[in-house]
Amino acid sequence: MSQFSLGLTGLLLAAIAGILATPIGVQSTTPARADSLCPADLDRAIALITSRPELARSRWGILVQAIDGETPLLARQAEQYFTAASSVKLLTTAAALQKLGADYRIRTSVYGVGSLPNLRSLQVVGRGDPSLTTAQLQALVTGLKEQGVRKIEELVIYSGYLVGSSLNPTWEWEDIYASYATSVNSLILNGNSVTLTLSPTQPGRSPQLSWSDPLAARQWQVINGATTTAPGSPAQIELRGELGQPVLKITGELPADGEPEVWNLAIRDPDRYFLDTLRQLLTTAGIDVNRDRLVNAEPALGQELGAIASPPLPVLMADTNGDSNNLYAEALLKQLGAPQGNNGLDTLSQTLTELGVNPESYRLADGSGLSRHSSVAPQALVQTLRLMAQSPQAQLYRDSLAVAGETGTLTNRFRNTPLQGQLQGKTGTLNGVVALSGYLDGPNLRRSPLASWSTNQRNRLPWFGRRSMKLSCSCGNSNLVSA
């Protein structure tokens, strides 16, 4: 028998999948509706998991409902608020797709004032494209040179397109040093992140520091108090920041034969990083820049000399949902709000209400779910999933989700289980929170929206091996996976 790892949330879904995967009646050849299944079987299977003694202080929220049915197949605390984690991204992307449309792209434009070859001003207007890279900037600079630009009196970077704070004030301060909690500004470059690597040297000496981008490294002062130790000794390295200060302190020990320690960090001042990178590229290309400045008020624009367009919205959504990219989620939220002059939360709520989602079923403080101030009921997610499945954008929305055992954040989950390839979903994980929502396929119930939460987990969830059990009901027998 093949072995696999399956967490508690996975056990719940495996139990659900076991029921749905069993045809109703030996001769049944067509999918059945939710009300013809056996909810009692699901209740028993779920109770075997949630009643475990080590989960006595945990709280569970579960909702499973057919797209074409009004009665839930399974509901437990479905209208209660839970810490949302990355499940919020399902709401953000649904609103973005409804409001902005599938053809939406985020445009970064460059305008020139003056006559070639010497421009009085080169103006860069960023609009929050989270996918922008140095390679794309290099291509833009090459295009400027080919047009005859040789000198720029003033390089002006307009960074005021997006509304609100670039760093969410409800995020935990320990997170803001990490690349998954970087600022969301109008001119995002390289994901606003940089990699710091600490490599062992000779015993007794300090490990060597290296940065993936020297321009980003300028923004940090690193105090390296670590020591390289003898081969075979344990690695004990800690990286700490000082709140409000551009200081990183490294302490501990790294064995001479050990693997390097790698940290993906947030760039502290992404506007300055963008400006420094662009100016360096211009200078390297032989285009002289006399001075530069960052502005929040949009200048009187000249003629557009070039532009970079992001991939279309469905591609951005795939990064947001499939790979659970916080930066992309927050950027899409701000895209919703920028034309209306808000941070996106009001527009998101209005859009989802128009779609038919109960506005009282969620309370959001961000678009990614990193904030513990964001609360969502399973009802909100299942409503969103059902309504999007009935919309003209249904396939685009579904395609943005990870596939169990195959892609995205579900690549290594549910392999060799009934869920592999049958569940498309969005994970949600914070300390003490595990969530999974999405669409579950089966011969009895096609594309059933579901949401499952476990909160107040004191420790990391235990993992279990596989064994089979049989549950009998009036509908027949179902092979379920349990612990």
Image: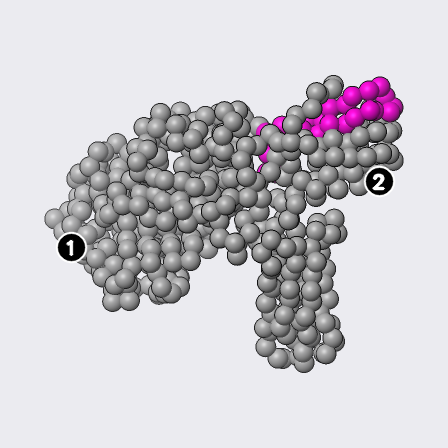
Looking at the picture, does residue 193 appear above or below residue 461? above
**Helix, strand or loop status at disc 2:** helix
When asked about the image quadrant of residue 98, the answer is: top left
Task: Where is residue 369? Give x, y as percent.
Answer: 44, 45
Quick one: 265 or 136, which is closer to the camera? 265
Quick one: 100 or 412, which is closer to the camera? 100
- State whether residue 336 appears in this view: yes
Lower position in the chain sequence, tag 1 or tag 2: 2
The answer to whether 419 appears left or right of 133 in the picture is left
The answer to whether 287 appears left or right of 439 in the picture is right
Task: Where is residue 195? Give x, y as percent.
Answer: 65, 55
Disc number placed over residue 284 in the picture, else none: 2
Task: Where is residue 4? Give x, y as percent.
Answer: 40, 62
- State whether residue 423 appears in this view: no
Q: Which residues are drawn in magenta?
A: 106-131
Residue under the point 34% across and 43% down: 376
Looking at the picture, does residue 226 appear above or below residue 79? below
Residue type, label 1: Ser
- Name the residue tied to disc 1: 472
The answer to whether 145 appears left or right of 43 in the picture is right
